[in-house]
Amino acid sequence: MDSESKREREKRVVSEMIALYCRWNHHPKRKGMCPECTELRDYAWERNDQCPFMETKTFCSNCKIHCYKPVMREKIRRVMRWSGPRMIFTHPILAVRHVIESKKEKKRLERENAS
């Protein structure tokens, strides 16, 4: 998979996770995301666009260099922890793919560290 389609897929996943979090935690009756969640999504997209490691990494959490500002990193971490388990019900294919890629990345990192 080339880095451009990987970037777009990662943007889609983070957008869906933020939207799910926002819908359930900020305003369940209204369409769209609140300004805070829109800002977080835009920030995540910007970081994704600037990432020089897109070719080799799977997820930001596995990256050696954390380019998120501490406040934004905590916000995205909160969103991921909440949305992750719930994604299986709203976007099962994305959720299963994420689990599979996470397992592969964990094994790859273990082999890398063992050598």
Image (spheres, helix red, strand yellow):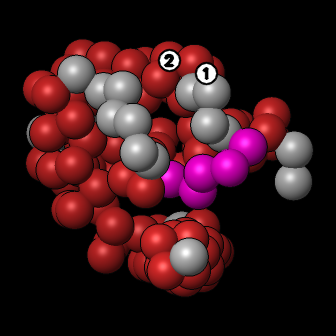
Seen at 63% across and 27% down, the residue is 52
Give the residue type at disc 1. Answer: Asp
Residue 8 image-quadrant placement: top right
Quadrant of image for the N terminus:
bottom right
Q: Secondary structure at mark 2?
A: helix
Quadrant of image for the C terminus:
bottom right
Is residue 27 covered in magenta? Answer: no
Q: Secondary structure at mark 1?
A: helix
Going by the picture, which residue comes out furthest to the front?
A: 115
Chief SS of the magenta region: loop
Marks 1/2 in contact by CB < 8 Å: the verdict is yes
Query: Residue 14, percent across and down?
Result: 46, 45
Seen at 22% across and 49% down, the residue is 77
Q: What is the crowding at mark 1: few (fewer than 14 residues within 10 Å), some, or many (at least 20)?
A: some
Q: Nearer the viewer, residue 24 or 108?
A: 108
**The residue stretch that appears in magenta:** 55-59
Seen at 44% across and 47% down, the residue is 63
Q: What is the crowding at mark 2: few (fewer than 14 residues within 10 Å), some, or many (at least 20)?
A: few
Query: Residue 25, percent across and down?
Result: 13, 48
Give the residue at mark 2.
46
Vertical position of residue 16 compared to residue 114: above or below: above
Seen at 22% across and 62% down, the residue is 81
Q: Nearer the viewer, residue 115 or 67?
A: 115
Query: Residue 24, percent across and down?
Result: 20, 53
Q: Is residue 74 left or right of residue 47?
A: left
Give the residue type at disc 2. Answer: Glu
Give the residue at mark 1.
49
Residue 16 visible? no
Vertical position of residue 40 compared to residue 15: above or below: above
